[in-house]
Amino acid sequence: MKIRIALFAFFICLLSTGCKSVCEKCKGKGQIVCEICIGEGQKKCYVCEGEGKTACSYCDGDGVEECSTCYGSGKRRCRNCYGSGTAYEYDYNIGEYRYMTCDDCDGDGKERCNWCYGSGGDICSNCSSGKINCDKCEGQGKIECDNCSSEGEITCSVCKGEGRQ
């Protein structure tokens, strides 16, 4: 009788699984945790390196845009002498017009920029402190894992998803 039961069990095993043992790698599940995303279904964004933010392209990440009038110098060409440093002005000492050192720019030819008030720039209107949300991950810091199609698991390479080997 024991031999009959053993033979019966053997034939059942042979017909159903081909007498394969449980796969040790996946423990019979046929799936293993994705090594790229460690089962989360998402991986660190490669553009922002998981930060969710990237440097603003308008201000190069420093939070200050260069003034478009003075190009960051804080000064612009003097409007009185047109940058020459001398102006045709009335000299009260001698009572006539003549070329004199420009009073507006003290002969420098440049005056403080009236757009940025001499600072050379202004707070960037496109970002917050030089950072903007990453376009790739939309500020989340993570993107979908393409290795596991965001499932978190992949087919076991040992048993090919059967759970037995």
Image (spheres, rainbow, N blue to C red):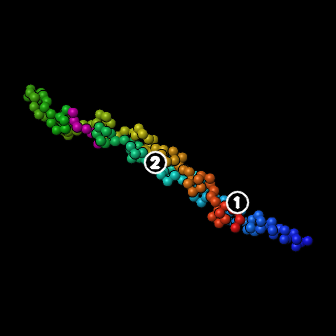
Identify the image quadrant of residue 160.
bottom right
138 vs 153, nearest the viewer: 153
31 to the left or right of 46? right
Badge 1: residue crowd in 10 Å (few <14, some 14–19, many ≥20): some
Residue type marked 1: Lys
In the displayed structure, 63 sits above or below 18; it is: above
| The magenta segment | 73-79
In the displayed structure, 34 sits above or below 92; it is: below
129 to the left or right of 1? left
The answer to whether the residues at label 2 and label 1 have Cβ atoms under 8 Å apart is no
33 vs 128, nearest the viewer: 33
Identify the image quadrant of residue 97.
top left
In what element is the residue under mark 1? loop
Is residue 40 part of the magenta span, yes or no? Answer: no
Residue sitting at 75 percent across and 68 percent down?
Answer: 19
In the rendered image, the quadrant that contains the C terminus is: bottom right
Residue sitting at 62 percent across and 58 percent down?
Answer: 154
Identify the image quadrant of residue 98.
top left
Where is residue 81 drawn, in percent x and y? Answer: 17, 34
In the rendered image, the quadrant that contains the N terminus is: bottom right
Residue type marked 2: Thr
Disc 1 target residue:
29
In what element is the residue under mark 2? strand
Where is residue 16 drawn, in percent x and y? Answer: 76, 64
Residue sitting at 56 percent across and 53 percent down?
Answer: 145
Disc 2 target residue:
54
Where is residue 146 drawn, in percent x and y? Answer: 55, 54
Is residue 78 part of the magenta span, yes or no? Answer: yes
97 to the left or right of 15? left
